Image (cartoon, coloured by chain):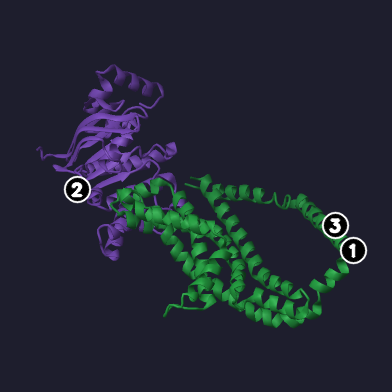
Chain colours: A purple, B green
Amino acid sequence: MNTAAALEIEGLRKSFGTNLVLNGIDLSVGEHEVTCLIGASGAGKSTLLRCVNLLEQIDAGRILLHGDEITRREIDVNRVRRRIGIVFQAFNLFPHMSVLRNVTLAPTKALGKPRAEAEAEAAALLGRFGLADKRDEYPDRLSGGQQQRVAIVRALAMRPDLMLLDEVTSALDPELVAEVLNVIRELAEGGMTMLIATHEMSFARDIASRVCFLDEGLILEEGPPEEIFRRPREPRTQQFLQRIVEAGRL
Amino acid sequence: MASEGDRRAGLEVADSRRSRVLGSLSGADGRRGVAIALLSTIVFLVIVVVVVANSPGWPTVHKDFFSWHYFKSSFPEIARAFLLNCKIFLIAECLILPFALLIAVLRSLPGPVFFPLRALAIVYADFFRGVPTILVISILALGVPGLELSGVPTSVVFWGIVALVLIYSAYVSEVYRAGIESVHPSQEAAARSLGLTRWQTMRKVILPQAVRRVIPPLLNDFIGLQKDTALVGIVGALEAFNQSQIDVAATFNFTPYLVAAVLFVAITIPLARFTDWLIERDRRRRQAEGLHA
């Protein structure tokens, strides 16, 4: 068992009905590493992240978190999820709760932290990401960028070993993308282990330790960002990146 | 940033839609609209009054149903009896709200393990929505005391309330269920992804949003319940309808029915207006949200 890897995925398969979405994924993410998943919509990026967080039941394969197999039948999914943070494309904040309560809900309910302690920690995190003055606002009063930063803080409040980011800037207006990417960059610099599905190619090139190109449920090509973006080997990767360049996104 | 401007635009859209009821409401057009609405209402009422008052049977109907003398003389007793309707209503409602919520939650439990509970909830809701209210009231209020079991209440009011709770919980549980299902699955995913249990997710994330959304339809069922309290009179409880029947039998004049109707309407119409107001407010809020989502 390779204890150095924070996350290991072996032969992961997942289909929805007759639709085969993940067709044998093998992937390893080292501690403090940032791995970016790129690929066309429908390639399976989001499904892969949801499988890692056990939001989807897998059909075959294994997922290990710090050497601990989390896809065992008898595993307590709630305990696993407390160690893995996920941030969604559509923020998914709780609209009936203030920003502060959004952040403290899980620490108080799932970890049983005293409310005062959870609130102090949440306030500190919110302050760190420029949201100190928003703590008593409700999500619908915030911009998309602010909501997504709150969603990131909400996940961080659980002090996860691993963060999964699922196209976190795709639902944002272009001028709001940078503030969210800066938060992620800060996390990466702080050594957070992350698995990121993204369409932001230049961001992936800057931040990733490794880039994986997903195509039809398989990791077709992976390597350091310079290699994938400058000298892609696979024709499919070349085509995909060509289209991205043509769209002016790289 | 979702600007104030967006929010206001949302309100204006909502206003323009609401104004379809009364015609346009703003400016000179608005005043003209109100004037036309007023005029056509008056013309309509005059026609109705003229037609009814000129009908051949009107003098008899007027004497039998609209007698001021009998209205005054029967009012105090019927009003006192109406307090029983209000009591039945309030007690039943306090039991229906939590009981129906329990049924709805049982019904939304996932997985094969919970099949028996789900099935029970479905059978319950199907059965009590399918049987006429008056039958359930009659069977329980007349049948159960007839068993002469010791310790079992024999009051018809007690069993009338039980019957109403059983019937209305079936309806209200469906309303709750619609609310629960209207909360987007991504909310559940977000809560579960943070490590909250299924029950914590239900209690802290799903139900608060679901209940807020179904308050207007819940109030609608309240209105129905307030009316149906009159059915408990059938099995002998001395509530407003039963009292008015006694008065009618004693005087051979039907005006006491009118008294009872007026008392019911005095409660149910404000409730209906309040419900509509809530629905309208809710819709406007949602639209404002939708615009900067």
Amino acid found under the numbered disc labelled 3: Val
Task: Evaluate whether residue B228 shows in this view.
Answer: yes
- Residue occupying the point 65% across, 75% down: B242
Q: Are marks 3 and 2 on the same chain?
A: no
- Please state the horizontal and vertical placement of residue B138, each as a whole percent of the image: 56, 69
Label 1: chain letter: B
Report the disc number at residue B43: 3
Report the disc number at residue A74: 2
- Please state the horizontal and vertical placement of residue A247, each as a whole percent of the image: 41, 24
Q: Which residue is mark 1?
A: B56
At numbered mark 1, what does the secondary structure look like: helix, strand or loop? loop
Q: Is residue B181 above or below residue A44?
A: below
Query: Quadrant location of residue A223?
Result: top left
- Looking at the image, which is closer to me, B169 or A58? B169
| Label 1 – label 3 distance at C-alpha | 22 Å
- Looking at the image, which is closer to me, A85 or B211? B211
Closer to viewer: mark 1 or mark 2: 1
Q: Is residue B8 left or right of residue A49?
A: right
At numbered mark 3, what does the secondary structure look like: helix, strand or loop? helix
Amino acid found under the numbered disc labelled 1: Pro
| Label 1 – label 2 distance at C-alpha | 82 Å
Q: Is residue A39 above or below residue A149?
A: above
Label 2: chain letter: A
- Residue occupying the point 30% across, 64% down: A115
At numbered mark 2, what does the secondary structure look like: helix, strand or loop? loop
Give the crowd class for mark 3: few <14, some 14-19, many >=20 residues within 10 Å.
few
